[in-house]
Amino acid sequence: MSANSSSATEFYLLGFHGSKELHQLLFATFFFLYAVTIMGNTVIIVIVCVDKRLQSPMYFFLGHLSALEILTTSVAVPLMLWGLLLPGMQAVSVPACWAQLYLYMSLGTSELVLLGAMAVDRYVAICNPLRYSIIMNSHTCIWVVTVSWLFGFLFQIWPVYATFQLTFCRSNVLDHFYCDRGQLLRLSCDDSFFTEFILFLMAVFIIVGSLGSTIISYTYIISTILKIPSASGRRKAFSTCASHFTVVVIGYGTCLFLYVKPKQTQAAEYNRVASVLVLVVTPFLNPFIFTFRNDKFIEAFRDVMKRCCQLLSG
């Protein structure tokens, strides 16, 4: 399965190692998590769109975050599931590999930018409540999500282009379940130190830059909450940003674990486990984190379900 740059027209994905029984167990587990992820995030998008009580910046951003979660996990998980059902390696054409890596990185970047914007939204809501509706108006919200989507797709053009400009002459077998950039760099026979260093700096810029706005926002948020005299007031204020804070800790933690490292050609098993966390586990948890103990969303969900039942029965 070796090829040089002139004859390499496809890559082969090794997927997960292990017996057929292990593959069947992994397929059942990942399929369940993926299905719940799609359904949970779809429910959030639908409820936010149809219920007038959720027409606020926080839920507007949450709807877009859910859309990004659906798209990000759908870029790689279906291919991973298909690989668990088939014996041997999966063949992926170079254009398909390019497209998968570009979409995955672009959507992930957009999600990080949006998470940073959501932190600023919580800062304005708690620290400047009287000016919240003026600052976070509909034009601002639309501008924020538009920039988040566009920035992700524009920012990742060069990194993906640079990756596929390398010469893959060692092999065309990727020890992963999707077209992982670290594994692609391992196949290159070029000196990729400079490219890897630039990719590292760009990952630092996105993750740490977005994380910086989040840290600054929550520093002011916590400071403001601690100044509230009543315990019930502090509890109510913190509950409005607790779900976002939890998602930030999980999301940034896994991204730092996977991407912010000088050497992109990390051990295959390390990358595989980290990718499962990013692509499967985190998107599965997020809908529950955002809706758990969110009385307004739960009430809206119940009302929508009642209306659906009435339409079906009537």
Image (spheres, rainbow, N blue to C red):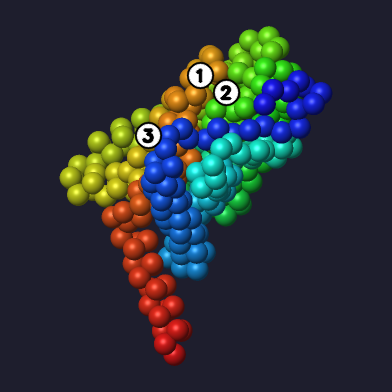
Decide which of tag 2 and tag 3 comes sooner along the chain: 2
**Mark 3 belongs to which amino acid?**
Val
Query: Residue 67, image x and y in percent?
Result: 54, 52
**Mark 1 belongs to which amino acid?**
Gln
Q: Which mark is residue 249?
A: 3
Decide which of tag 1 and tag 3 comes sooner along the chain: 3
Which residue lies most toward the bottom here? Answer: 314
CB under 8 Å between callouts 2 and 1? Answer: yes
Q: Is residue 32 above or below residue 277?
A: below
Question: Residue tagged by mark 1?
Answer: 266
Q: Which mark is residue 182?
A: 2
Query: What residue appears at the point 55 percent right and 18 percent down from the top-left corner?
Result: 265
Relative depth, front residue between 180 and 89:
89
Query: Residue 169, image x and y in percent?
Result: 72, 18
Between the residue at mark 2 and the residue at mark 1, the CA separation in whole angstroms equals 7 Å
Residue 225 can be seen in this image? yes
Relative depth, front residue between 254 and 218:
254
Where disc 1 sits, the SS reads loop
Relative depth, front residue between 195 and 119:
195
Mark in the foreground, 2 or 3: 2
**Mark 2 belongs to which amino acid?**
Gly
- Assess disc 1: are there few (<14), some (14-19) or many (≥20) residues with their C-alpha within 10 Å of its C-alpha: some
